[in-house]
Image (tube, rainbow, N blue to C red):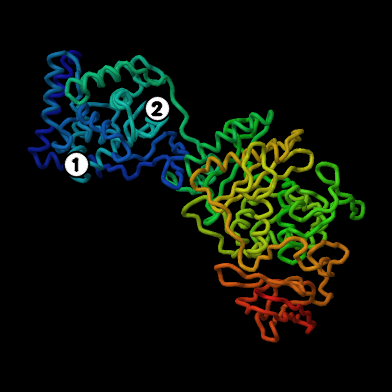
Amino acid sequence: MKTPRSRWPLRLYAGLLAGILAVNAAGFTASEVLRRLGPVPLGKGITYSTLVTDKDGKLLRPFITKDGYWRLPVTSKDVDPRFLAMLIAYEDKRFYAHAGVDPWALLRAAWQAATHGHVVSGGSTITMQVARLLEPRPARSVSDKLAEMVRALQIERLLSKQQILDLYLALAPYGGNIEGTRAASLAYFGKEPKRLSTAESALLVALPQAPETRRPDRFPRQAIAARNRVIALLNAAGIVNADQAEAAASEDAPKGRLAFPMLAAHVAEHIAKSAPPGAVAETTIARDLQASLETLARDRALLIGSGVATAILVVDNETGEVRAHVGGTGYFDTLRAGQMDLANALRSPGSTLKPFIYGLAFEDGLVHPETLIDDRAVRYGAYAPENFDDSFHGTVTVRTALQQSLNVPALQVLNGIGADRLMARLTNAGVKLVLPQNAGPGLAVGLGGAGVRLTDLAALYVALARGGEPVQLSWQLSEKRNAKPLRRLFEPNASWMIGDVLKGAPTPQNALGGQIAFKTGTSYGYRDAWAVGYDGANTIAVWAGRPDGAAVPGVIGRIAAAPILFEAFQRIGASRVPLGPAPPGTVIATTNQLPANLQRFRPNALPEVATASRDAPPTIAFPPDGARIDLDGDQAPAVSLKVYGGTPPFTWLADGIPIAQGEFRRDAFWDQPPDGFARLSVIDAKGKTASARVRVE
């Protein structure tokens, strides 16, 4: 004969009480029960969602577990104290006093079941609920309840109250595939559970009791009703005052689930692939800056044109750590290929490599920012380059040529230093340009005829900001740097000259000039718009264009990318640092004050080394004969030495005394030269020599 349904709860609780007494009174029976139960589950095998965080531990992007759950690690320190107080007051007010099972709660539950004819409260403690979550027993029989109590007693002996509470917060069910308070707070409120309102806290207390029938995304009325019952009970218990209760009960419940955070999505995805399940991977990203620049990238892309995407990179100059990595415009924006990391896409750099052409020429002593250079029609075989504005500007200074991004002067200088030398220098600094198939280095490299990634371009400009010293970019705090050493891009003097020139580049409309050194670029056919700039603390690189490489008429670096660059610098805020002063030994002079061979650039008068011939005798490129060198500055003075032609290694002498020996590079340093006149000499491996008389002041 079946037990009448109305009497089942009473018999259930009577049986549970008898079971507890039996376990506590009979040692053999308890031992047998424990043997059958097996090892105590303590949550050590739980797999949590892999989390990718910013440099301060703020969540950028979580990943779903392999079993399909959003289960984010959380402790009581991560949760609003008011929520914890409400949870304990509602679920288990003697939590800190009992040993896992609360006899008074069981007696109360049994009495309520007997008097009401149905279950009013379950009598389960938080520890018992943790035992059920760790070791689910779907049958929910009397023996299952007894086993749950035994497990609760065992867990209390092995774990602290804090650890038990943390397990509840991490595993409590909140409907669907949401587990844990942190995941629920993000899914339903779009925020971390560190700060919760009274209504939000009450809802999170109510949901685990019946997560599937109270889900606010499916059953908002039931969710509100359950939440308000919690509020009323806590109001009666004095945990929530009348005004708080009234205000909380009038709030709407969330009507759907929100998307989990997905900041720096491309970086997070890359890192998560190599991280072990459940790992918390810290990045170098600054969350607030990342969020701000993702918004900026999306808004600007929509203004530029249909199908246009943008990418932004922010790098800390001192460390090479990436503070923001915007790989596209909306991760799920299929029109703009949102899931493609455009910061790592190979694109044509346009004119953004021109500063490095001049940097090598500055270092070689071939030109100076105030050197005059002709911007006129010129032909290299069948190739006749033109400027972007289809006009020529006559004789200008190198400074003007770079600031105005004139093509013809840049190619004249590149023809002098050699495209292969430029590419070798960039490669040694850690950035390898990608040439078209079966193509060799040529003048087209100077105008964007080689592929480069935004990340690589940013690295080159970071090296400029660091005085010519490259550093490997990093995206993770624990990331090991490449063991392969990077060679210096330029000497400090040449790097400073580039920055000093680029500070004067024409700025976008309404932007304040002179604060950052920057360069824009536009690839052939209006396919890529670039802007890269730096101050004393940060380097920012911006790209805009269509992910599919289609032309976007009118999309020019100065118009499309530069405004994003300047706005990004504004959003960095307090970390802005001005560019530094000129290094010691930097020649700062007007055109007329320069040595004769630096006053005007004459391509036809270049030494044969310009065509990479080692048969030519050595020639001192810097300092030129008759130069006056001013070494004012706080740092230890040094003079940069450059040689054309000849066969390495080289030996340098000052008044017959060796100052540098065995140098295979064509540059060296003369440390702490004395004031006055001196004769510099260089001897190559074949014994050929060259000399120059200079004056140090």
Work out which quarter of the rendered image holds the C terminus and state it. bottom right
Residue 469 placement (x, y as % from top left): 60, 62
Whether pointer 2 and pointer 1 mark residues with C-beta atoms closer than 8 Å, the reply is no
Expressed as whole percent of the image width and height from the top left, the position of residue 580 reads 57, 57
At 70% from the left edge and 85% from the top edge, which residue is drawn? 655
Q: Up-down: is 614 above or below 151? A: below
- Residue located beneath label 1 in the image: 156
Mark seen at residue 211: none
Could you say which is closer to the camera, residue 636 or residue 613? 636
Work out whether 85 lies above or below 495: above
Name the residue beneath numbered marker 2.
189
- Of all residues, the one furthest to the left in this rendering is 25
Q: Amino acid at mark 2?
A: Phe
- Alpha carbon distance from label 2 to label 1: 33 Å
Assign the N terminus to one quadrant of the image: top left
Asked whether, in this view, residue 382 is left or right of residue 115, the answer is right
